[in-house]
Amino acid sequence: MIRRPAAHELDAVLEIDEASFSWKMSPAERARAAESIEAGVVRVAELDGELVGVLGASSAEMTCPGGALARAVAVSNVAVLPTHRRRGVMSAMLAHLFDEVHGSGSALVVLYASEGGIYGRFGFAPASFAATYRLERDAARLRPIGTGQPAVRLLRPGEAAEALPAVFDLARRQRAGELERSPGGWAALLEEPAGPVARFVAAAILAGEVAGYVIYEVVAQAPASRVRPEEAVADRLLRLVELVALDEGAYRALWSYLLDIDLVGALVTGPRPLDEPLRFLLEDPRALEVRRLEDHTWLRLLDVHRALCERRYRAAGSLVIEISDGHCPWNAGRIALVVDPSGQASVAPSAAPPDLVCGIAGLAAGYLGATSWRTLVRAGAVTAASAASLARADLLFGTAEQPFCTPGF
Ligand SMILES: CC(C)(COP(=O)(O)OP(=O)(O)OC[C@H]1O[C@@H](n2cnc3c(N)ncnc32)[C@H](O)[C@@H]1OP(=O)(O)O)[C@@H](O)C(=O)NCCC(=O)NCCS
């Protein structure tokens, strides 16, 4: 049976989480889990009177290509007790969620996958990608960024909690794939880190307004006793937690600030968009080293008609798409997507020959514009009727920027 847990089942829920991910929750995380249960975000799977699985699902606004905003369901903490794996518990929780969400006003389900092999079978596909970067401080010099840039000022914790959410809320509307961040998400992000980590928040300010911010930490990599004095600086790492800018001036000013910070050997980032403009700000573009490139958010379209109407398109035109969907049969069939000159689409059933034939995961992979239809055709995830159909599909769905999602959830 899949159901919402009661408040008194918090410990059982946390036990599943901790045993499944092999971690221990901090008191702050326990408190946030209790809030999630109270808010109705958590579902549990009960088997023979015992809780064996857990799944979080909360509603959040997602930015679609063209800047349109849509409701999405953000799935988190999918976990099944190690003693009850591979018996269909996760499958049952997802099937229950799909039925619950279908018809509820959200056409999109989004998650971060712990492993790449889990979610494709349920119709999810990687819909945005992320890179983590490293810059050796001595090698990373910016080209002159010009005058009239915003000033950068350090913020105290209270100031950060007040200023950052509004800036992020504006910024997240500018890129497809971004989700709004919940109050709990802000609390987790701005929480003082544990251990000997120095964390700072700085803001780019122009004409008295915050136009962007950066959250970063400086950590020593090796224990102090093992570092020779002459290596102390090289050992210190600046970790970029989040950089959000509302415009180019703020973006350049924040990177200029970060790369000017003394007494660090290198700077490493968390997940960032693939099309990070920083590369073109550097005197030597190779100074921006890609450490890791991986799938970021995975997307599942639960209502194809609605999802296709929620995003905007780059040109007027039409496309007939035949879709198969083993888990959500209401999505299967042939549709005509007709885009008007303003980039808005209408969708209706069609009997015309299809331009594209794909499974629901193929459609999810192309939805936010991270991957072209050409690439998906080459991978065998989509079939195109002709070169002209494929070119039209890429013209319609293409986006100028790579999609991304800043908040973790
Ligand atoms: C991932 C997890 C939730 C799967 O739960 P589960 O109840 O064992 O999953 P199911 O029995 O419903 O499996 C459904 C299918 O997915 C496959 N599958 C499950 N976990 C998988 C994994 N990690 N990698 C590849 N395939 C996986 C199963 O083999 C099964 O395949 P089948 O349909 O061909 O038989 C569970 O293993 C777990 O808690 N893992 C640790 C925490 C974690 O990584 N959670 C995911 C967070 S995004």
Image: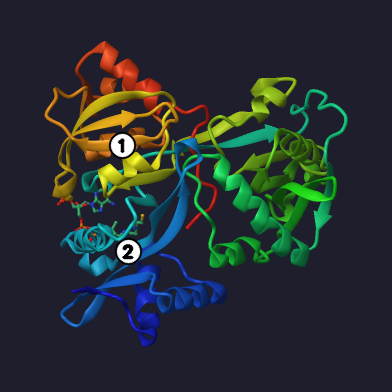
**Residue at left 33%, top 18%?**
392
For mark 2, what is the residue? 79
* Left/right of residue 232 with respect to residue 222 in the rendered view: right
Q: Is residue 62 visible?
A: yes
Q: Amino acid at mark 2?
A: Ala
* Mark 2 residue element: strand
List the single residue furthest toward the front: 341
Comes first in the chain, label 1 or label 2: 2
**Residue at left 46%, top 37%?**
65
Q: Is residue 342 above or below residue 85?
A: above
Q: Amino acid at mark 1?
A: Ser
For mark 1, what is the residue? 346
Q: Is mark 2 within 8 Å of ligand 1?
A: yes
* Left/right of residue 127 with respect to residue 288 in the rendered view: left
Q: Is mark 1 within 8 Å of ligand 1?
A: no
Q: Is residue 127 above or below residue 220?
A: above
The picture places residue 93, in percent across and down from the top left corner, at 24, 64
In the figure, residue 372 lies in which quadrant?
A: top left
The picture places residue 378, in percent across and down from the top left corner, at 28, 20
List the single residue furthest toward the left: 351
Q: Is residue 375 visible?
A: no
* Mark 1 residue element: strand
How packed mark 1 is, by other alpha carbons closer than 10 Å (few <14, some 14-19, many 20 or more), is some
**Residue at left 67%, top 21%?**
285
How packed mark 2 is, by other alpha carbons closer than 10 Å (few <14, some 14-19, many 20 or more), is many
**Residue at left 43%, top 75%?**
39
Q: Is residue 70 above or below residue 371?
A: below
Distance of mark 1 from mark 2, alpha carbons? 38 Å
